[in-house]
Image: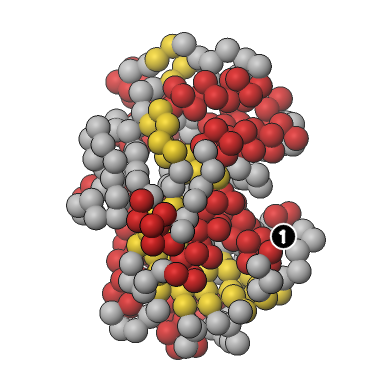
């Protein structure tokens, strides 16, 4: 098989590239001219230049490809230019899927997110949990929700797409890092003296990548599959990380209401200094109001998906950040 992977220089995308290469497939990667390529160093891949915000640059990128793994997305919980995020995540997805239809690829695996799914209070959400656009908090969730709708619309027109919904990946090669990677990095460095009462579904990035290949091989066109791991409270996540680095976990639990004025101030500062990332945002506090717990039962039974424990995923993430000196204020 010859596959095109978008977002290949990023965290999840580079893991998908490695999984494909390990299985003996030929891989073409779509990267922007400005993309950092450290995650692709030493890998035998064909590179093509393109940008999801420039649909014309996508034409011809799928020639001779059997499959597309559309992993690329603008993943930030704070963004000064909302329109650019929608152009990349919604318009770019539509353009690439239309290109896939034209090229006649055999299978598309579209990387959505559990961000597009509903939440069950005091329970586990799955692929069928009711949700609507009005439930999406912030531009990232909104854009991914609309992008997934575009994929389903094109499935009805013949697009052979399977949708995967990763939960909260952690692990090696989180260069930016992602919002969750920042939590791991900062906790390992002792820069998280307090926490809020929330929860996440933690999964190893390499298990998410393997889930992509299983979706290609065994997924049903038009279906969605949650690629998750273990449901863990933030307190438990910080406890595990503290144990890995020999620190005491934070004991102070903060109310989200106390943090609201801090978030307002952080956003105001970031707006003035457009390269800054707020320490905390109002959207993050809104999302933290519920435990974001999910079930991967469908992927386990239908795809044979079998993720490792969340503690192992956190251990690999911490080891990677420590190797880069990120837990001591260095790179990362």
Residue appearing at x 49%, y 27% in the figure: 237
Q: Residue at x 57, y 39 (%)?
A: 313
Q: Which residue lies most toward the right here?
A: 42
Q: In the rendered view, does 103 fall on the left or right side of 293?
A: right
- Label count reads 1
* Residue nearest the viewer, comparing 286 with 251: 251
* Above or below, comparing residue 66 to residue 300 in the picture: below
Asked where in the image residue 231 lies, by quadrant, the reply is top left
Q: Is residue 62 left or right of residue 27?
A: left
Q: Secondary structure at mark 1?
A: helix
State which quadrant residue 144 falls in: bottom left
What percent of the width, then of the height, locates residue 137?
30, 44
Q: Quadrant of residue 27?
A: bottom right
- Residue 180: horizontal and vertical position, in percent? 51, 38
Name the residue tied to disc 1.
Answer: 40
* Residue occupying image coordinates x 65% and y 44%: 172
Q: Is residue 330 left or right of residue 170?
A: right
Quadrant occupied by the C terminus: top right
Q: Position of residue 261 (x, y in %)?
A: 35, 22
- Can residue 266 be seen here? no
Query: Residue 115, image x and y in percent?
Result: 36, 49
Task: Say above or below: 292 vs 43.
Answer: above
What's the residue at 60%, 87% (across, down)? 64
On-image quarter of the N terminus = bottom right
Front in this rendered view, residue 148 or 233: 233
């Amino acid at each position: 098989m010859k596959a095109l992977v978008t977002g290949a220089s990023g965290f999840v995308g580079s893991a998908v590239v490695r999984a494909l290469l390990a299985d003996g497939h030929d891989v073409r990667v779509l990267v922007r001219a400005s993309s950092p390529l450290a995650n692709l160093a030493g890998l035998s891949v064909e590179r093509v230049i393109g940008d999801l915000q420039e649909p014309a640059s996508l034409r011809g990128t799928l020639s001779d490809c059997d499959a597309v793994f559309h992993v690329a997305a603008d993943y930030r919980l704070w963004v000064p230019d909302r329109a650019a995020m929608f152009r990349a995540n919604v318009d770019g997805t539509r353009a690439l899927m239309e290109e896939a239809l034209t090229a006649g690829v055999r299978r598309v695996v579209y990387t959505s997110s559990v961000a597009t799914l509903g939440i069950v209070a005091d329970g586990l959400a799955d692929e069928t949990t009711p949700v609507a656009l009005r439930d999406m908090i912030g531009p990232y969730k909104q854009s991914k929700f609309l992008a997934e709708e575009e994929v389903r619309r094109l499935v009805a027109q013949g697009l052979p797409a399977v949708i995967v919904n990763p939960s909260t990946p952690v692990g090696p090669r989180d260069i930016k890092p992602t919002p969750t990677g920042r939590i791991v990095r900062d906790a390992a460095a002792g820069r998280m003296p307090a926490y809020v009462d929330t929860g996440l579904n933690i999964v190893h990035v390499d298990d998410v990548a393997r889930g992509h290949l299983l979706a290609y091989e065994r997924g049903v066109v038009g279906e969605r599959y949650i690629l998750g791991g273990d449901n863990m409270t933030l307190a438990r996540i910080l406890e595990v990380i503290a144990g890995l680095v020999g620190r005491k976990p934070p004991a102070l639990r903060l109310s989200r209401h106390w943090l609201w004025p801090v978030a307002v101030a952080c956003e105001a500062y970031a707006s003035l200094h457009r390269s800054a990332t707020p320490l905390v945002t109002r959207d993050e506090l809104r999302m933290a109001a519920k435990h974001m717990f999910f079930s991967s039962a469908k992927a386990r039974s239908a795809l044979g998906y079998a993720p490792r424990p969340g503690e192992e995923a956190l251990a690999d993430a911490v080891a990677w950040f420590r190797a880069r000196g990120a837990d001591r204020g260095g790179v990362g």
